[in-house]
Amino acid sequence: MAARAMWKGRIRFGDVDVPVKLYSAIRSSSGLHFRLLHEKDLQPVKQMMVNPATGEIVDYEDVHRAFPTDDGLLVMLDEEELAALEPEASRDIEVTRFVDPEVITHAWYDRPYYLGPDDSDPEYFALAEALRRQKKEGIARWVMRKKEYVGALRLEGDYLMLMTLRHTGEVVPASTLNAPAGRALDKREVDMATQLVAALEGDLELEAYHDEYRERVLELVEAKTEGKVLQFPRAPRKKIADDSLSDILEQSLKAARKKATA
C-alpha cells in the first residue's frame, strides 16, 4: 500500500527552495481500542462532562477554558483570544543551521516524518546527497496545522527525514540523576561484564520484535468469538538473586555462551 502524503511544504535555506511532501514514518493504529459497555445491558456508554457541584451534565458549548497559574488562580481564556495567538500559516520548512548529528542526543527526538520530493527530484536528491557527504543534520522550524515545530532534517537511506524535537523544559538532563555510588568493581567483574557484552553482540533484526500483548489479546478475541477457551500460562516469578555480583555475571556469561552455541 503506497504511503499517502499528509502535508506539503518547502525546505528553504539561503536561496535553496525544495518542494516536499510529508509522510508519517510511524503508524498509530496498531494499538488496542476497546469499547466501554454497561455491565447490565452491554450498551455502549458515553463520557460526559459533569458539574461536580450539581451533578448535572454540561453541554460542550457551555464549557470554557481556564489556565491554572502557580498561585492557584484560574485565568479564563476564550476561543477568539486563543485563535489570535496561533502562528501564521506557512508552507516553509526553514533550515536555520546545520550541525553534527551527535549534537542532538536521542532524548530530544520526538516524532519522525519522511519527506519525499514534490516534483522536485533533482533538487531533493541533491540536498540529500549534500547531507550525506557533509554528515550533517539541519535544524528547522515550520508551522503545520496551526502548531509550530522545531525539528532535525536528517538522512534516512536515500531519503530525507524530518524528526520533530522536544522543547526546552521537556527533556530531563542525565545530570539530575544521583551519581552512582558503591564500591569500586574489581578487575574480574569488569572483565566478565565486558565478555558478557561481547557474547550478546549480534545483528539487529527489528522485525523480530512484536507487540506480544496485542497479539495475545487478538488471539483471545478470536478464540472467544469461536466459543473457545484459551489458557495462558502464568509467567514464573523471578527469584530475587542473593548471589554476589561475580556469581551473577558468571552465570549470565555461561548462559549467553550456551545460547550462542545452540
Image: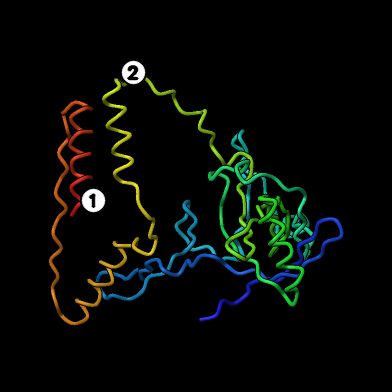
Determine whether label 2 and label 1 are within 8 Å by CB: no
Q: Which image quarter holds the C terminus?
A: bottom left
SS class, disc 2? loop
Foreground residue, 257 or 120? 257
Amino acid type of disc 1? Ala
Is 59 placed left or right of 81 in the picture? left
The residue carrying mark 1 is 260
Instruction: Please tell me whether residue 176 is drawn above or below residue 45 in the rendered image.
Output: above
Residue topped by disc 2 = 184
Q: Position of residue 79 (x, y in %)?
A: 70, 59
**Disc 2 marks which amino acid?**
Ala
In this rendering, the answer to whether 36 lies above or below 199 is: below
Q: Position of residue 4 (x, y in %)?
A: 59, 77
Q: Residues within 10 Å of mark 2 (few under 14, many from 20)?
A: few
Q: Nearer the viewer, residue 8 or 190?
A: 190
Residue 100: quadrant of the picture: top right
- The residue under the point 64% across, 59% down is 162
Residue 227, position in %: x, y?
A: 15, 80
